[in-house]
Image: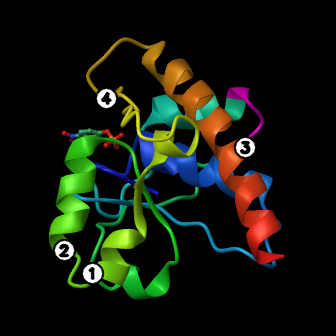
């Protein structure tokens, strides 16, 4: 799961998807394309909205996406078009590029809908982001379980 800062959207996406998959079969992680928040805990507003929905994401630590992630992970879900461009710019092969998906396209194929960055916005931005990610992660988890079990 990839966003810009790895403190608002992708930590939520990581926590939500991990909660819907069997832990012994799947590894879910998140990263940011930017480096500002390396080593930091998720934004307190993301921690709060996760907690409100029964998830604890407070132990996550920010890290920056790197080209090694193309080898480590089978699927790379990005939150918005700018994340998509930044991740694709690091891809060196067709196979690596094919691993990258704008996450909401899993729910609304080809619409290229973005998960909005709630960092500078109003407080309910985090509720909106949570609801979007919860809905799409349900679809992703279902697909992954069918494909890989
Ligand atoms: P995120 O939100 O990409 O969802 O983690 C942001 C967090 C921090 C910044 C931008 C977006 N920032 O500019 O520091």
Q: Is the magenta stretch mostly helix, strand or loop?
A: loop
Of the numbered discs 3 and 1, the one sitting upstream in the chain is 1
Residue 130, horizontal then vertical, whole percent: 58, 30
Q: From what the image shows, is residue 82 above or below residue 115?
A: below
> For residue 90, which quarter of the picture?
bottom left
Q: Residues within 10 Å of mark 3 (few under 14, many from 20)?
A: some
Residue closest to the eye, 143 or 66: 143
Whole-angstrom CA distance, mark 1 to mark 2, is 6 Å
Quarter of the image where ligand 1 sits: top left
Image mark for residue 89 = none
Quarter of the picture holding the C terminus? bottom right
Q: Give the range drawn in magenta.
A: 52-56
> Given contact means CB atoms under 8 Å apart, are the residues at marks 1 and 2 in contact?
yes
Where does the image place residue 20, in percent across and percent down from the top left?
78, 52
| Residue that badge 4 annotates | 119
Task: Identify the element where label 1 is drawn.
Answer: loop
In the picture of the structure, the residue carrying the numbered disc 2 is 90
Question: In terms of sequence position, does the residue under pointer 1 or pointer 4 come before the other?
Answer: 1
**Which sits earlier in the primary sequence, circle 1 or circle 2?**
1
Image side of residue 66 versus residue 98, left or right: left
Residue matched to label 3: 138
Disc 2 from disc 4: Cα separation: 25 Å
Q: Mark 1 points at which residue?
A: 67
Ligand 1 closer than 8 Å to label 4 CB: yes
Image side of residue 86 versus residue 135, left or right:
left
As drawn, 69 above or below 110 = below
Mark 4 Cα within 10 Å, few/some/many (few <14, many 20+)?
some
Q: List x then y, in percent, for residue 67.
A: 27, 81
């Amino acid at each position: 799961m990839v966003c810009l800062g790895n403190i608002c959207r992708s930590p939520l996406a990581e926590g939500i998807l991990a909660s819907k998959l069997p832990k012994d079969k799947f590894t879910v992680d998140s990263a940011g394309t930017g480096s500002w928040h390396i080593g930091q805990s998720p934004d307190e507003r993301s921690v709060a909205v996760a907690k409100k929905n029964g998830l604890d994401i407070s132990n996550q630590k920010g890290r920056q996406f790197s080209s090694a992630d193309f080898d480590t992970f089978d699927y790379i879900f990005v939150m918005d078009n700018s994340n998509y461009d930044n991740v694709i710019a690091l891809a060196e092969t067709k196979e690596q590029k094919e691993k990258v998906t704008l996450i909401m396209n899993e729910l609304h194929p080809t619409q290229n809908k973005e998960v909005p960055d709630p960092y500078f916005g109003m407080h309910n931005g985090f509720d909106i982001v949570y609801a979007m990610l919860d809905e799409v992660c349900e679809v992703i988890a279902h697909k992954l379980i069918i494909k890989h079990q």
